[in-house]
């Protein structure tokens, strides 16, 4: 870290460990909380993705995470993985699980990712399918988890990646999280990543629901996680806070507003994000805040020059000085709070 003499605020200067790339916005689901599936925007051309991977390696990035839309829809997904592996980089990907067929899982395990994040928002099939706007998607996701376990376990040479459930917490499913964790006994996943609903006020928890979640369900989540050996990726299950001012902010869907009143954001030490149009941002949350966090375009400048640019330093200075998003994911808050290397998470 270096210090800005004018503001006396610390500025992140480390090379990020993780680069997240949105391969495309096209999706197999029609989620109620997302409109990417409506997008006609084209995916990043393969030649440009190879360029991004080359730039990432030169810059010192160690892992690339693919997101979307549904990243496994990318036409040359396996060629992309092979090229990334050939460059000595690790990778992970975020998926709704709809394309985790036996053929796909067998092929991906030949070059296994470090982690697979699977979006499942309920232990109840009908509820999850309804939230994701796609009938049968719950069944496909869990069949995919079974396949990762069975294929890897029946082979001496294949290694199963860490399987993480991305669970969006709403006023419809917050009481079902302990039951979701209990499914790990049958379906064998490793961690659960609790995230608050964003952009959908009708699905946000009210004050009474948050208080019920804190007093009744969060303790059950802790108990279930201990019983089944599941790691909660956030600092703890109290993702809406415990103080009255934290809860009031969360009712307004300003989930991280109070956190960043006392905590500086150093997420730029850990990650960087590239949109489908090549725009570079400090993390996965910041693209939704317009140009405030825009750092450059990887199709116009190399990544190393963007990371060391005046614009990047200005964005980092602003992040350390209070220009912060109010919907930061709990896992990002944990990274900021504990300063854990993302490679250990």
Image (cartoon, helix red, strand yellow):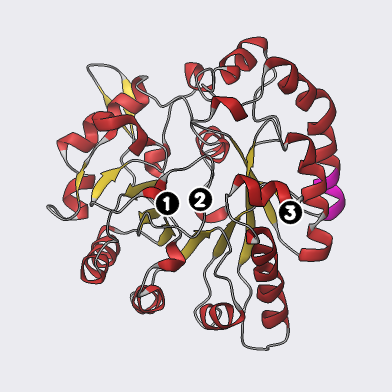
**Residue 15 in view of the camera:** no
Q: What element carries label 1?
A: helix
Q: What separation in Å lies between label 3 and label 1 (alpha carbons)?
A: 21 Å
Label 1 with label 2: CB-CB less than 8 Å: yes
Q: Is residue 126 magenta?
A: no
Tell me whether the residue at label 3 lies in contact with that at label 1, contact meaning CB atoms closer than 8 angstroms: no
Residue bearing the label numbered 1: 37
The stretch of residues the image draws in magenta is 224-228
Q: How crowded is mark 1: few (under 14 residues within 10 Å), some or many (20 or more)?
A: some
Q: Where is residue 250 in the image (x, y as percent from the top left)?
A: 59, 20
Residue located beneath label 2 in the image:
30
Up the image or down, 244 lies above or below 145; here it is above
Q: What element carries label 2?
A: loop
| Depicted 80 relative to depicted 94: above or below | below
Prevailing secondary structure of the magenta residues: helix
Circle 3 residue? 125
Query: Tag on residue 310?
Result: none
Q: How far apart are marks 3 and 2 (CA)?
A: 16 Å
In the rendered structure, which disc, 3 or 2, sits on the residue that comes first in sequence?
A: 2
In which quarter of the view is residue 318 placed?
A: top left
Q: How crowded is mark 2: few (under 14 residues within 10 Å), some or many (20 or more)?
A: some
> Does the magenta-highlighted stretch encompass residue 227?
yes
Is residue 209 or residue 221 the one in the foreground? 209
């Amino acid at each position: 870290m270096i210090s800005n003499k004018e503001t006396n605020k610390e500025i992140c200067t480390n090379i990020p460990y993780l680069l997240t790339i949105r391969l495309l916005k096209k999706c197999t689901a029609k989620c109620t909380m997302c409109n990417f599936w409506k997008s006609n925007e084209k995916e990043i051309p393969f030649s440009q993705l190879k360029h991004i991977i080359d730039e990432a390696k030169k810059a010192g990035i160690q892992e690339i995470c693919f997101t979307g839309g549904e990243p496994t829809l990318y036409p040359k997904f396996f060629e992309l993985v092979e090229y990334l592996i050939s460059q000595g980089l690790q990778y992970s990907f975020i998926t709704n699980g709809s394309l985790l067929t036996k053929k796909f899982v067998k092929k991906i395990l030949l070059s296994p990712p470090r982690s697979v994040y699977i979006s499942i928002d309920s232990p109840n099939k009908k509820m999850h399918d309804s939230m994701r706007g796609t009938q049968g998607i719950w069944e496909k996701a869990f069949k995919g988890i079974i396949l990762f376990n069975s294929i890897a376990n029946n082979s001496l040479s294949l290694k199963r990646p860490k399987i993480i459930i991305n669970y969006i917490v709403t006023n419809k499913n917050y009481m079902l999280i302990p039951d979701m964790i209990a499914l790990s006994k049958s379906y064998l996943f490793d961690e659960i990543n609790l995230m608050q609903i964003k952009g959908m006020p009708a699905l946000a928890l009210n004050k009474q629901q948050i208080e019920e979640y804190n007093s009744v369900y969060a303790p059950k989540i802790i108990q279930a996680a201990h019983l089944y050996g599941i790691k909660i990726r956030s600092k703890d299950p109290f993702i809406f806070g415990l103080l009255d001012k934290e809860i009031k902010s969360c009712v307004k869907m300003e989930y991280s507003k109070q956190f960043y009143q006392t905590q500086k954001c150093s997420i730029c030490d850990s990650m960087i994000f590239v949109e489908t149009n090549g725009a570079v941002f400090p993390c996965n949350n910041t693209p939704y805040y317009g140009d405030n966090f825009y750092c450059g375009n990887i199709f116009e400048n190399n990544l190393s020059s963007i990371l060391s640019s005046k614009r990047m330093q200005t964005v980092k200075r602003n992040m350390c000085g209070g220009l912060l998003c109010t919907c930061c994911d709990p896992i990002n808050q944990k990274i900021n709070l504990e300063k854990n290397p993302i490679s250990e998470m």
